[in-house]
Image (tube, helix red, strand yellow):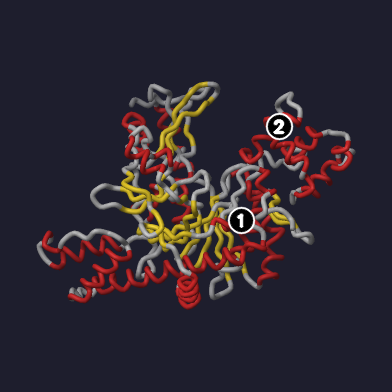
Amino acid sequence: MNFSCKDKEQIEAHGLSLAQVEQQLERFQKGFAPSDVVRAARAGDGIERLSSQMIETYCQAFEQDKDKYVLAKFVPASGAASRMFKDLYDYVDSDKSIEECPQVSELIDNIDKFAFAAVLDDKLKTQGGSLSTYLAERKYKQIVKTILQPDGLDYGQSPKALILFHDYGSQVRTALEEHLVEAANFCVNQDKHIHLHFTISPQHLDKVQSLLNEVLPRYEATFGVKYDIQLSVQKSSTDTIAVNLDNTPARDHKGRLIFRPSGHGALIENLQETSGDIVWVKNIDNVEKDALKTGDYKYKKALCGFLLTIKQKIDAILFDIESKDYSESLKQRIKDLCEKTLRVKLRCESEFENNEGYFDYVYSLLHRPVRVCSMVKNEGQPGGGPFWVGESNPRLQIVEKSQIDLSNEQYNKVFLSSTHFNPVDIVCSLTDHRGNKFELNAFVDENAGFISEKTQQSAKIKIQERPGLWNGAMAEWLTFFVETPIDYFNPVKTVNDLLKAAHRPL
């Protein structure tokens, strides 16, 4: 591709190299191969189902060993809440009556149950009215506009992190504050510090920092902790070039190349910078009220205990391999770990010239980040699912629907047989047996990206997303799936989700 000098300057200013952009263009030409799903992971076949006794055992393992590691929590929170209010925008931008908009009608009928009702009332009073008078006068569009627009609550352009989610009577909490509370109950280090990393859009950084400055002293006093908050943005160097439908570079009205954010897979670089050996990953909108948190905390600890139990076995084997203790007992431990725990088919020793070659192979197999992913029973929710991938030596992966060729009868059959999905509730080990942090980009499957069509200035363009954070970006990690109750999966995808039992006032 022949780029002009101005193009090259723009590419360089974006933090990208010419070679990277040319590689992206080549990807548009070739596309991404669909995922080779062999079968759906199920309870007993890739998904662990913990008994109550096992949960207690792993909770004890967590309490016993957690102080050996730096604990942290990573919360992707970059997106605006605009999708959450899509139905409200549709209502405001149309001539429809409220009776023709059932979602808006539900919101209005239950407006007093939302945690933001009081601040909404305050804002309406500055406009010369109040929530009660506007309801009585059926000024519903004015109420909705005040929720959405900058001269009101500005929720339409705010990040979900700043939306008031829960009302406790004496206080209301934003989604961000619920993560502060959650972390204080299982993610406290021995020095009483809590490491929390939020990814935020650049335009929202100041508002998020302002909220943190306001609320951190209160939560630190309540829990007797010190929060170490890390805010980061998705790097422009992870953006991808957009193309026209004929795969030529798309340009804006000024003739400049168009670059687009490459999806949540780009956050693997932000995760790399997280201060922690053991890191929980959870989306910003998946929080519940305090009444449900106790059980959720127990599972968080149990899954981490599960992770630490496996990590310690892996670490011991890696140390023994480094010491060149090539004993038969070590070989048996490796066989047991790989075949019974990791469910990895080992190559035969006879394939290698000597012991050293075999143990180098085992070392490369085990010297990887580890993740334990919560899986909940699928009741129709969108989200990636757990599958065995790869015909010759299947491995556990989280695969999105868009990665599967559903026109292929066999793949479609596998997809439809899936019983669980990924709620993005993961605990990870990011450091090896010597405490060195893994280079996470080394474990990304670059062939697991996405291509989709978007509209830019009324023209159709194609965009490319990097392998998803919990999909291809973690494809080469050691992966475990554990079934958890759906009670602890309470995402807020639309504003009316806040009316569900996990969110509404008692």
Displayed quadrant of residue 24: top left
Q: Height in image: 142 above or below 300?
A: above
Q: Residue at x 14, y 64 (%)?
A: 349
Rate crowding at label 2 as few (under 14), some (14 to 19) or many (20 or more) other CA atoms within 10 Å. Answer: some
Secondary element at image label 1: loop
Q: Looking at the picture, how far across and down is residue 314, in whole percent?
A: 32, 69
- Which residue is nearer to you in this view: 50 or 5? 50
Asked if the residues shown at circle 2 and circle 1 are in contact, with their CB atoms under 8 angstroms apart, the answer is no
Q: In this orientation, does residue 360 appear?
A: yes
- Which residue is nearer to you in this view: 465 or 117? 117
Q: Height in image: 488 above or below 130?
A: below
How many angstroms separate mark 2 from mark 1 (CA)?
27 Å
- Which residue is nearer to you in this view: 252 or 445? 445
Q: Earlier in the sequence, mark 2 or mark 1?
A: 2
Q: In this orientation, does residue 441 appear?
A: no
Q: Looking at the picture, how far across and down is residue 35, in whole percent?
A: 34, 42
Amino acid type at circle 1 is Val
Q: Residue at x 49, y 54 (%)?
A: 376
The residue that mark 1 highlights is 287
Secondary element at image label 2: loop
The quadrant of the rendering that contains the N terminus is top left
Q: Residue at x 65, y 46 (%)?
A: 497
Q: Looking at the picture, how far across and down is residue 317, in whole percent?
A: 28, 71
The residue that mark 2 highlights is 101
Amino acid type at circle 2 is Cys
